[in-house]
Amino acid sequence: MTDFNRRSLIASAAAMAAMPALAASPKAPAADAQKKIRAAIDKQLPENIARIQDWIKHPGIAAENWRMDEACAYTMGLLTDAGFQTVKKMPTKGQPGIFATLDAGAKRTVGIYFMYDVKQVNPAEWSSPPFDARITNKPGWGQVIVGRGAINQKGPEAAFLAALHAFREAGQKLPVNLVLVAEGEEEIASPNFHQIVQAPEVMAALKKCDGIVIPTAWQSPNGSVAINLGSKGPLEFQLIASGERWGKGPKGDIHSSQHAHVDSPVWHLVQALNTLVKDDGFTPAIDGWFDNVRPLTAREKELIAKTAASQSEAQAKAAMGVKMWINNEPWQQSLERLASQPTVNIQGLVAGYGGPGGKTVLPGRAEAKLECRLVPNQTFREAETKLKAHLAKRGFGDIEVVVSGGYDPTETAEDARVVRAQQAVYARFGAPATLYPRNAGSWPGSVFTQPPVSLPAGQFGLGHGSGAHAPDEYFLIESINPAVQGLAGCTAGFVDFLYEMAVAR
């Protein structure tokens, strides 16, 4: 055993002793069962850490179609090891999904969503190789695992699996049955996830669930956490301008001196992009974009006000490296904007030469990668249709629109069992929790919340991590902040959540 693991076990034992009962209710497991599960989490901590590291070392990047079959097979093995009796590979038009069930003979069933793909990486931007999963010290937080997928989502997902291992090690039966669906295309906006969910056997299993959650770990430095009642939906696409398709400009790159009498596909694309937002640079200007946008309700504004009061604006700015919000708006107003406003964002522009020095070239092709974030009551298909019509109306119908993925926004009622269960667990762990109307990010929860599945869905998890989609992504495993749980506390939180889902009314 390494020195780190010995220190972890000592720290974990102290932390576990301070943890609340796993489910402090009349129907909670007996005290001896609680002790056994806590001891199992403590005992298995080194292997739980190693599991996260090994999972990070088995990446799959859907955007590059890189090692996806291997990543799917590895994830299926993790589910089997965790006790799922059925683990099935689900083919789609793209990357395969996974359907798994664990029958504990319980009265209630809980749905779990996993993703096994990760974002692309540029190793030159990382302090250590992105798939080495190195353990290092993060000032102010403690020991972390650094690697692509560490927080999004392998760390939290592995912590959930660690909870299942702890039940088995402690000789305790799960209080609920589990239905798990996983995909390998979340990072490309889930273009085929609906095929997995709508498979008859998956649909029948989901219909038995009381709700579905994606494991997370997003405690703030003060230990607080926001319970999101929904998420925005994405529309991810590319705009491609080419001289060949346009009928103007060159078919391929030519000498830049020819621009005096040859059109530029790059400028053509830039002009098209300029029509997508107003002069302020952030308000969508696509025709009809706001036709169906639902304003915030009075209750949603009330929830945002509570969140603004409980979260640190300074810490939020520091985490993102920004000095001010749009229009230099105050904190609460900026959070209202974050929850309520759809966006049109340019992810990247690719055209011509990008190497050292200059190159006298007039490119024949230019591409922009964009995504829109959608809010209720917008839909993914509506957004796609309006985008294409907007471009065509302004003389940019020749620009190719390639939609790679997307789905609708998601909403769950605040009195849903999955929400109330989260509130109960966070309260027992001393983690101040606020309800927040809508996460600005996206996950394919609308596949669950909309018909024909019609399940409440959300995210849950103690612990912490950050850097999703960025260099040096990390997941906290040994916390030096008493307000924030490390891996052991994150795992215990999932145990408590399953017990709470079994008894919550």
Image (tube, helix red, strand yellow):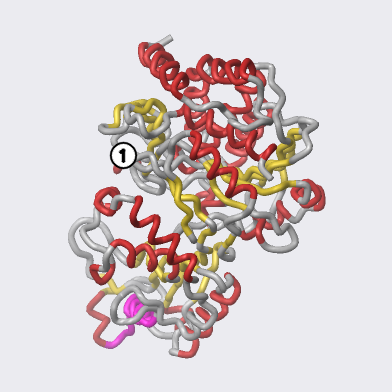
Residue 300 covered by magenta stretch = no
Q: Amino acid at mark 1?
A: Trp
In depth, the one of 173 and 450 nearer the eye is 173
Label 1: which residue? 126
Mark count? 1
- Residue 269 visible to an observer of this rendering: no
Magenta stretch: give its range.
261-275
Query: Main SS of the magenta segment?
Result: helix
Residue 44 screen position, x and y as percent: 53, 17
242 sits to left or right of 450? left
**Residue for point 46% across, 28% down:** 487
Q: Is residue 412 above or below residue 8?
A: below
**Residue for point 55% across, 75% down:** 384
Image quadrant of residue 396?
bottom left
Image quadrant of residue 334?
bottom left
**Residue for point 40% across, 11% down:** 6
Residue 285 screen position, x and y as percent: 41, 82
In depth, the one of 423 and 175 nearer the eye is 423
Residue 292 screen position, x and y as percent: 54, 79
Report crowding for label 1: few under 14, some 14 to 19, many 20 or more residues within 10 A (C-alpha). Answer: some
In depth, the one of 464 and 96 nearer the eye is 464
> Quadrant where the C terminus lies?
top right
Q: Is residue 197 above or below residue 105?
A: below
Residue 265 covered by magenta stretch = yes
Q: Secondary structure at mark 1?
A: loop
> Quadrant where the N terminus lies?
top left
